[in-house]
Image (tube, rainbow, N blue to C red):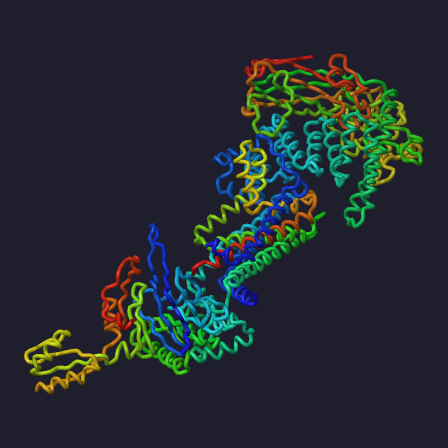
């Protein structure tokens, strides 16, 4: 699989106002996104997601490190013909209609006016804004969801091979979110590469092949959804565990409740543990694969809490800290490596 | 460059839809009112007042439209994040900047042109039956000079807008407009200065700050006998000066904007 | 950031070098003289006024700022509108600083100089509409500044010329101003410059120069009419100009030829000037007096016949009809600080010394009518003018009646042969009895027509009764004469600001200057007073070659300020 995005040791520093100090918005980030991959880029607000995307698009410049997009340095004008960007809560020229906006953006790709208009009609219909009530409305009268659809329409003008979507579902109601999610699934089906930044974890779980979590500018975890979420460990409850086995499992953190020992074991070890239990005449009470949610990982890494209503991570609000701060102990580091 | 034109067109249509033309309408009303309010004066004085005030009002309206439009064009794009989607498209930064600049020029051109046209028509109507009246068409020379002055001012404001906030830009541009209008004074002061360092600083100011004062062509138009010795040279060289200086400012703006983080 | 950008875009950055060079070059061209308008001359007083204005003394801050930012004309216009409002509300003191600022802001606004000078020289007046002549030098200084700032256009020269001519009555000064206009502005409007120049020469007693100026005016008009692309209106104005200039040139030539002849034929008039100056109240001076003055009647030139060159008179007609009233010939009365002379202002300043007292007034002389033996006159009890129909036949009222009646007989009696009626008397009666239409040509009966008409009148008792007897027309037994008299009470008590009387000694000067006299009076006395004399008051020293009548009455402060009636001078 060829790399669509290659980020190597990318660092972006901002000066702290009024001080001779810098903060790292992005801190020594290295990751690769393969072609055809839907890649989730997770982090709380202010974690460095948007900064990374802006660097990849050439809107801002890295302090150090390399960022290549479709084989060319970030910001390359030829590459921009093949990529597209949907910013977080996109803003458009408020006085224009969806169709005018998309026509305008289409012309930026060098399309002639007529061609651009045709394309705009097509895309506006595709994102569901072609209805009579919407088609002549200026964007200023649009709801957030409708604006998002305009954003998606403009992101599809050039039939891009690589899409950068920044928080495409944030702030939307349930129906709008579902529609957009469906759209992303459609894009996935079409084999597009997508760099999806979000803190809407469900979306990522559902859409992405792989995901990473970034916190305070640093990469915390990276892996396939399988790796991140799925059955790596299995919870085994054993009654009357033989002493030898119990000692071994307890050393790995098993907990004894009465006669029952609850242990979490790596999937590969499950057979040997059961065999050992059986041979010691212990009875296996239950074997349950430990299916986790991204949320759990997120909470563990970010240390924040989830908003019960929205299901998304409450913003920690803080900018990345000064660069000498060491990140907290991370049990998933080995996965990242 | 096509892309720049697309952005320019879009900028003009946005400015027009934002009712920038209302300024023209207001000025138009004032201009028409002007032709009535000085009737207590003798005809020649009345015409002098109408023409002088009219050109002044166009110039003043032009000044405010230019400054307010140009200090905001780029910062607004950044602030409302429309620039992200545009620069994510195959648009070079200089194309974006030039597009905005040409859009501003188009808007100004339409405004000043319409104001000028309304003014010339008002004067022409006023002059009907007047004895020994000078053709109102020569007023277009004054309007051309105003337009050129505004071209230069627009470039100045655009240049600053690539790296300072609109508020700072407003004061910066206005102060330079005032200093630039005093260009002949800075030269005189420099010539009369005894202290070498003061002399060179003043000369520096004289040559570096755009000479906005030279675009004032009202008097030779009001008093047809007050002549610039070489009018053709004066007008063409002023236009060339405005274009050259504006180009230099836009080159600088492009260079600054090229590395600007948005 | 910029360094990086330069490094990344060397080609683009490279264009800055030629662009900067171009900008500096253009700016240097801008600074060249031929790219500038005539440089505005800003006298020191302007600089101080301007500086003071930024301190808040004159121009409000927002005006200053606007003026600095290239809206000088607008601000000048606003101030001008404002000063016009001040003028209409009578707040003249506020106008002067305005004019100062306006001319500084816009030194090329010709109308401001013209109107400003008009305000200064004409509109600052006392209660009785006498101009405050302390402002004359100020107004002239403003005009001089205007000329300095607009030396290549005729407008301000013309204004100065007119003010010199009409207000200051310094005709040499007017000549200088008009000549300045012609010398500096090839497009000077002939009617407005060459014509008044010729008139100024005439008033200055420079007859030949005046004729030459009319000649020059004709040539200039003709040259102008040959200019390509001129409008019909300009053509018409110039052809009218040619007509007027030609006519005026003829008049000057005829006067030049006739005036000395007339004086030689008629002799020198003894003016016998008498005047009494009385203080009636504090600061109220009464001036009254009488003098003999006989004017000529206007419009009675026989046309001269000229050689083909148009300049040399071949033959003259019979000349002027020489008698008639001198109404309109005026005595100048001036009361001033002893020895005051109008100062010349190097630069315009609106500060007038409030200590100066200066009053100038004009007292009109009425009367001065005469009739020869055998001539017709009106004898009524009331003084004053006769009816128009009589005056147009040169039949004047020689009141009071008793004197008049005693020296003549009613016209009906005279027609029966009681007294002889002279040829002129016959002309007067015929003209009055059978008046010609006002637009008839010639305007009067010729001497050849008179005998027949007079015979007709003798037989026309009805007309005699209705047109003549009813109007108290008499025929003089002997020559009668009513002297000119003048009387004026000059009240200076109402305007203490204008008439402060701060000095200790003053002088009251009464004068009649032949050069300011109406031309029908000049026709009798000549340009320079050659045709008059006065035993007591003839002054040919003050201006060499000019024979003025001039009475100087020295006055003390007490003479003017004291209360009660006092005769200050009688002689």
Q: Looking at the picture, does residue B201 appear above or below residue A175?
A: above
Image quarter in which the C terminus of chain C is found: top right
Q: Quadrant of residue B122?
A: bottom right
Q: Is residue A47 left or right of residue A59?
A: left
Kindly tell me whether residue A152 is visible in this rendering: yes
* Of A64 and B90, the residue lying toward us: A64
Q: Residue furthest left?
A: A258
Q: Is residue C274 left or right of residue A59?
A: right
Image quarter in which the N terminus of chain C is found: bottom left
- The percent position of residue C516, horizontal first and vertical second, equals 74, 26
- The percent position of residue B171, horizontal first and vertical second, equals 46, 48
Q: Is residue C343 left or right of residue A152?
A: right
* Of C384 and C381, the residue lying toward us: C384
Q: Looking at the picture, does residue C291 appear above or below residue B143?
A: above
Kindly tell me whether residue B49 is visible in this rendering: no
Q: How many marks?
A: 0
Q: Is residue B104 left or right of residue C136?
A: left
Q: Quadrant of residue B207?
A: top right
Q: Looking at the picture, does residue B140 appear above or below residue A314?
A: above
- The percent position of residue C99, horizontal first and vertical second, equals 58, 36
Q: Quadrant of residue C219?
A: top right
- The percent position of residue B135, horizontal first and vertical second, equals 69, 51
* Of C568 and C166, the residue lying toward us: C166
């Amino acid at each position: 699989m060829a790399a669509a995005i290659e980020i190597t040791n990318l660092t972006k520093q901002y000066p702290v106002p009024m001080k001779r100090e810098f903060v790292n918005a992005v801190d020594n980030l290295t990751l690769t996104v393969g072609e055809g991959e839907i890649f989730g880029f997770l982090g709380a607000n202010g974690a460095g997601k948007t900064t990374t995307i802006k660097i990849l698009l050439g809107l801002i410049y890295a302090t150090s490190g390399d960022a290549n997009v479709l084989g060319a340095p970030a910001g390359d004008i030829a590459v921009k013909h093949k990529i597209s960007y949907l910013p977080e809560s996109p803003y458009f020229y408020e006085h224009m209609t969806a169709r005018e906006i998309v026509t305008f953006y289409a012309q930026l790709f060098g399309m002639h006016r007529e061609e651009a208009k045709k394309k705009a009609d097509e895309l506006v219909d595709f994102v569901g804004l072609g209805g009579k009530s919407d088609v002549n409305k200026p964007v200023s009268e649009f709801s957030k969801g409708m604006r998002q659809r305009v954003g998606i329409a403009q992101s599809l003008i050039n039939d891009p091979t690589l899409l950068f979507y920044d928080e495409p579902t944030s702030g939307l109601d349930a129906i709008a979110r579902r529609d957009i999610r469906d759209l992303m699934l459609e894009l996935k089906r079409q084999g597009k590469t997508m760099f999806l930044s979000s803190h809407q974890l469900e979306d990522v779980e559902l859409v992405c092949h792989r995901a990473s979590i970034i916190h305070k500018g640093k990469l915390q975890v990276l892996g396939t959804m399988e790796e991140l979420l799925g059955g790596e460990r299995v919870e085994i409850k054993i009654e009357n565990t033989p002493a030898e086995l119990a000692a071994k499992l307890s050393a790995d953190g098993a907990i004894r409740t009465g006669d029952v020992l609850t242990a979490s074991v790596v999937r590969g070890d499950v057979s040997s543990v059961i065999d050992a239990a059986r041979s010691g005449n212990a009875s296996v009470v239950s074997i349950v694969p430990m299916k986790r949610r991204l949320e759990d990982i997120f909470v563990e890494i970010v240390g924040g809490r989830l908003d019960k209503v929205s299901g998304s991570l409450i913003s920690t609000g803080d900018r990345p800290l000064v660069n000498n701060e060491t990140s907290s102990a991370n049990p998933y580091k080995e996965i990242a490596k | 460059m096509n892309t720049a034109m697309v952005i320019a067109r879009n900028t003009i249509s946005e400015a027009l839809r934002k009712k920038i033309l209302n300024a023209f309408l207001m000025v138009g009303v004032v201009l028409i009112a002007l032709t009535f309010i000085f009737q207590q004066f003798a005809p020649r004085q009345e015409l002098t007042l109408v023409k002088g005030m009219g050109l002044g009002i166009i110039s003043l309206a032009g000044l405010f439209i230019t400054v307010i439009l140009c200090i905001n064009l780029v910062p607004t794009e950044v602030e409302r994040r429309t620039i992200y989607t545009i620069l994510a498209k195959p648009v070079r930064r200089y194309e974006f900047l030039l597009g905005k600049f040409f859009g501003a020029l188009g808007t100004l051109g339409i405004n000043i042109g319409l104001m000028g046209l309304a003014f010339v028509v008002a004067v022409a109507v006023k002059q009907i039956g007047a004895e020994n009246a000078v053709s109102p068409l020569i007023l277009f020379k004054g309007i051309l000079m105003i337009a050129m002055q505004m071209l230069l001012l627009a470039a100045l404001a655009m240049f600053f807008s690539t790296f300072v906030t609109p508020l700072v830009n407003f004061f910066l541009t206005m102060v330079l407009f005032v200093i630039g209008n005093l260009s002949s004074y800075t030269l005189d002061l420099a010539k009369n200065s005894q202290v070498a360092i003061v002399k060179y600083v003043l000369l520096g100011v004289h040559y570096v700050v755009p000479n906005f004062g030279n675009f004032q062509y009202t008097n030779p138009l009001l008093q047809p006998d007050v002549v610039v010795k070489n009018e053709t040279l004066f007008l063409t060289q002023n236009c060339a000066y405005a274009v050259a200086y504006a180009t230099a400012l836009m080159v600088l703006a492009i260079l600054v904007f090229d590395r600007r983080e948005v | 950031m910029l360094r990086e950008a330069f490094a990344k875009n060397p080609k683009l950055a490279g264009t800055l070098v030629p662009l900067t060079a171009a900008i500096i070059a253009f700016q240097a061209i801008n600074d060249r003289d031929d790219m500038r308008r005539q440089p505005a001359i800003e006298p020191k007083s302007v600089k101080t006024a301007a500086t003071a204005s930024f301190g808040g003394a004159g121009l409000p801050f927002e005006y200053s700022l606007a003026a600095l930012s290239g809206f000088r004309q607008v601000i000048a216009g606003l101030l001008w509108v404002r000063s016009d409002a001040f003028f209409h509300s009578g707040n003249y003191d506020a106008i002067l600083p305005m004019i100062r600022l306006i001319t500084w802001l816009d030194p090329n606004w010709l109308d401001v100089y013209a109107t400003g000078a008009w305000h200064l020289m004409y509109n600052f007046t006392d209660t009785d509409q006498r101009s405050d002549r302390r402002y004359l030098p100020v107004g002239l200084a403003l005009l001089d500044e205007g000329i300095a700032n607009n030396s290549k256009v005729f407008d301000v020269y013309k204004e100065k010329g007119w003010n010199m001519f009409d207000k200051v009555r310094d005709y040499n000064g007017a000549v200088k101003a008009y000549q300045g206009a012609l010398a500096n502005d090839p497009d000077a409007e002939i009617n407005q410059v060459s014509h008044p120049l010729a008139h100024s020469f005439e008033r200055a007693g420079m007859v030949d120069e005046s004729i030459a100026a009319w000649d020059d005016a004709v040539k200039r008009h003709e040259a102008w009419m040959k200019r390509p692309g001129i409008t019909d209106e300009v053509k018409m104005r110039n052809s009218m100009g040619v007509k007027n200039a030609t006519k005026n040139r003829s008049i000057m030539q005829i006067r030049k030829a006739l005036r000395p002849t007339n004086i030689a034929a008629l002799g020198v008039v003894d003016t016998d000037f008498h005047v009494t100056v009385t203080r009636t109240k504090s600061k109220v001076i009464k001036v009254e007096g009488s003098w003999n003055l006989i004017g000529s009647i206007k419009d009675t030139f026989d046309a001269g016949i000229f050689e083909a060159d148009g300049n040399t008179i071949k033959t003259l007609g019979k000349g002027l009809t020489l008698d008639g009233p001198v109404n309109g010939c005026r005595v100048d009365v001036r009361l001033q600080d002893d020895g005051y002379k109008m100062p010349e202002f190097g630069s315009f300043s609106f500060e007038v010394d409030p200590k100066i007292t200066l009053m100038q007034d004009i007292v009109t002389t009425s009367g001065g009518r005469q009739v020869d033996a055998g001539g017709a006159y009106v004898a009524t009890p009331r003084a004053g003018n006769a009816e128009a129909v009589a005056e147009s036949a040169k039949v004047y009222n020689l009141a009071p009646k008793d004197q008049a009646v005693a020296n003549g007989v009613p016209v009906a009696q005279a027609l029966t042969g009681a007294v002889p009626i002279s040829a002129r008397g016959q002309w007067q009666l015929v003209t009055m009895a059978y008046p010609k239409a006002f637009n008839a040509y010639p305007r009067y009966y010729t001497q050849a027509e008179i005998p027949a008409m007079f015979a007709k009148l003798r037989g026309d008792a009805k007309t005699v009764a209705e047109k003549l007897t009813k109007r108290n027309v008499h025929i003089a037994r002997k020559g009668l004469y009513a002297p000119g008299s003048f009387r004026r009470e000059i009240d200076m008590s109402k305007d203490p600001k204008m008439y402060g009387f701060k000095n200790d000694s003053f002088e009251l000067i009464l004068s009649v200057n032949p050069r300011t006299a109406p031309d029908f009076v000049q026709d009798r006395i000549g340009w320079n007073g050659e045709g008059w004399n006065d035993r007591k008051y003839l002054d040919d020293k003050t201006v060499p070659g000019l024979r003025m009548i001039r009475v100087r009455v020295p006055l003390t402060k007490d003479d003017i300020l004291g209360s009660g009636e006092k005769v200050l001078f009688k002689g």
